[in-house]
Image (spheres, grey):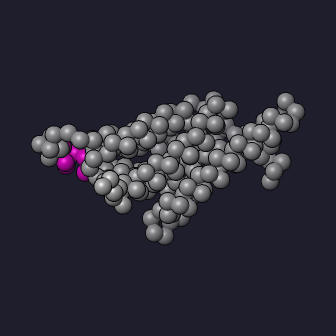
Amino acid sequence: MPHQPTTTKVRLNNISTCVAITVSTVDVLVDTLKISGLEAIWNTTQSLLKLLKTVKQAKNECAELMEQTDVILGAIIGVYLKSDTGIELSPSTLNEIANFTRTLHKIHTFIEAQQSGSKVKKFFRQGELNGLLKDCKAALQQGLVFFQIKSSDGISTVRKMQEQAQIRHQEVLNILETMSSSDSASTVWDVIHRQE
């Protein structure tokens, strides 16, 4: 009889699907706008998606970190799409995006440490990993507050997250399609502001 996936494994798979959709949206923006900050986020998140497939320990914590990561990624996409110029953001927003990029690297380190390995090494590193997890959670919470993401029960359900990610992705594709079919002088932002 085939091994049945645990609830946590299903949760990790579902959040991976959500993040993959969101990351593909970030990729479209990177290709279109050539924003280096988004490219760094895209690269790190792609690597995180690969790591999630082989997580052995702390699966619930990894899933929670990635759920919050997906929500903040969606907010960052929204900030770029709603910006007047599309590229120029306020210094505080750019600072928060930079903080989020650093947080992604910490999350990467935490999830990478959850791969199979020596139990003795993990025992001695447990305090360090607990501190890293605490830092990641605090930084993500700061991002949620900065981008004014409301969550009464922590984070939206995975199904709702998947729907939102797919809607965001489709919006970006529609904008780019409208751009390519309109005159060559149009920019992403001209198209967005025409649709409002």
Give the extent of the magenta segment. Answer: 125-131
Q: Nearer the viewer, residue 127 or 63?
A: 63
How many numbered marks are there? 0
Q: Say left or right for 56 vs 165.
A: left
Q: Give the image quarter of residue 117.
A: top left
Q: Quadrant of residue 6?
A: bottom left
Quick check: can you spot residue 134?
A: no
Q: Quick check: 189 left or right of 108?
A: right
State yes or no: residue 23 in magenta.
Answer: no
Is residue 128 rendered magenta in the image?
yes
Q: Where 65 falls versus 125 (above or below)?
A: below
Q: Is residue 191 above or below residue 3?
A: above
Q: In front here: 195 or 59?
A: 59
Q: Residue furthest right?
A: 183
Q: Residue at x 58, y 40 (%)?
A: 24
Label the magenta part by its dominant secondary structure.
helix
Residue 106: where, in percent of width, then height?
Answer: 36, 41
Q: Residue at x 64, y 31 (%)?
A: 31
- Report whether 86 appears left or right of 95: right
For image coordinates 47% across by 44% down, the residue present is 100
- Location of the N terminus by quadrant is bottom left
Residue 104 x/y as whole percent: 42, 42
Q: 62 or 88, which is in the foreground?
A: 62
Residue that protrudes farthest toward the bottom in the picture: 152
Residue at figure coordinates x 33%, y 42% from the top left: 54
Left or right, residue 47 beside residue 110 = right
Give the image location of residue 64, x and y in percent. Answer: 39, 56
Q: What residue occupies the far front of the structure in this picture?
A: 1
Residue 164 at least partly seen: yes
